Image: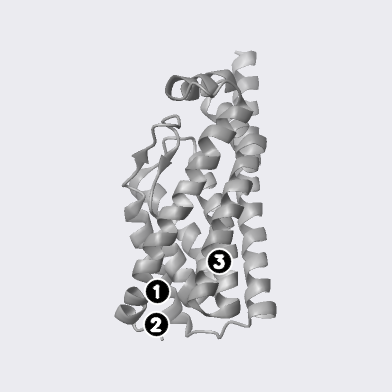
Amino acid sequence: MWNNLTDLWASAQDNVVYLLVCLGVFVALFVVAMLVERVWLKVPRQQGARRAAYIGIFAAMAAILMYLEFPLPFAPSFYEIDLSEVPVLICSFSLGPVAGVVCELVKIILKLLLKGTTTAFVGDFANFVVGCSFILPATTLYHRFKTKKGAIAGMVTGTVVMAAFGSFFNAVYLLPAFSALYGLPLDQLVAMGTAVNGMINSVSTLVFFAVVPFNLLKGLIVSVLTTLLYKRMERLLRMR
């Protein structure tokens, strides 16, 4: 009985620490986005109610798109690609970096309310953080130049940053956290990768041969769709 109580207390501590880390990361990303937007980019402020409505609309679109997840032949099943970053990026291009970070958060909250989690919240946290690592560079460069070339340069930069940061974050924090919170040894996670990709035999190869191409492919798809849809969506909602 004492052992059970000890395990329960340790599990509770792990969950509290994880929650505090999530909260701290969101605050840090929000502050960075606000400083970039207000100090460097000087993005014009929009009406509060209208801004909140647009963020809500795009977040709802993104949450719905999170239902459409596609497995990839080179990655284990807990890496599934979705297109939820498309409406978030359109929102960020229209309203600025802060709106992008908030839209990412609202998207995750809506998804959790509607669908729940199958990854002990680690996958949802990863989607938010790694998504922001794509959204922030892309939006910053777009708002800095406000040209089509600036948008393309931003999305290319965002894709590269997402691939690099996502790989590092997976190896250092996400995979160990998923292992601890979901109760699966890291070796078992690696084995799930080996089953679909023979080049995966360790955490580093899992990251290199699954996470890196996953994020590069996602960045490419999101960038192409955003390029095709952004002006149409902007005109439709009369954001200008």
Q: Quadrant of the N terminus?
A: top right
Q: Quadrant of the C terminus?
A: bottom left
Q: Which mark is residue 239?
A: 2
Task: Give the labeled residue for mark 3.
Answer: 154
- Where residue 35 appears, x then y in whole percent? 68, 72
Question: For the residue labelled by badge 1, is the local secondary structure a helix, a strand or a loop?
Answer: helix
Tag 2–tag 1 contact (CB < 8 Å): yes
Between 23 and 160, which is closer to the camera in this rendering?
160
Distance between the alpha carbons at the discs numbered 2 and 3:
20 Å
- Circle 3 crowding by C-alpha within 10 Å: few under 14, some 14–19, many from 20: many
Task: Give the labeled residue for mark 1.
Answer: 54
- Circle 2 crowding by C-alpha within 10 Å: few under 14, some 14–19, many from 20: some
Going by the numbered disc 3, the residue's amino acid type is Gly
- Where residue 171 appears, x then y in whole percent? 64, 35
- Where residue 179 appears, x then y in whole percent? 57, 27
- Where residue 18 appears, x then y in whole percent? 62, 41
Marks 2, 3: nearer the viewer: 3
- 75 horizontally vs 183: left or right: left
Distance between the alpha carbons at the discs numbered 2 and 1:
9 Å
Question: For the residue labelled by badge 2, is the local secondary structure a helix, a strand or a loop?
Answer: loop
Distance between the alpha carbons at the discs numbered 3 and 1:
22 Å
- Circle 1 crowding by C-alpha within 10 Å: few under 14, some 14–19, many from 20: some
- In this figure, what is the number of numbered marks? 3
- 173 horizontally vs 230: left or right: right
Q: Residue at x 33, y 81 (%)?
A: 235
Image quadrant assignment for residue 71 = top left
Image quadrant assignment for residue 7 = top right
Question: For the residue labelled by badge 3, is the local secondary structure a helix, a strand or a loop?
Answer: helix
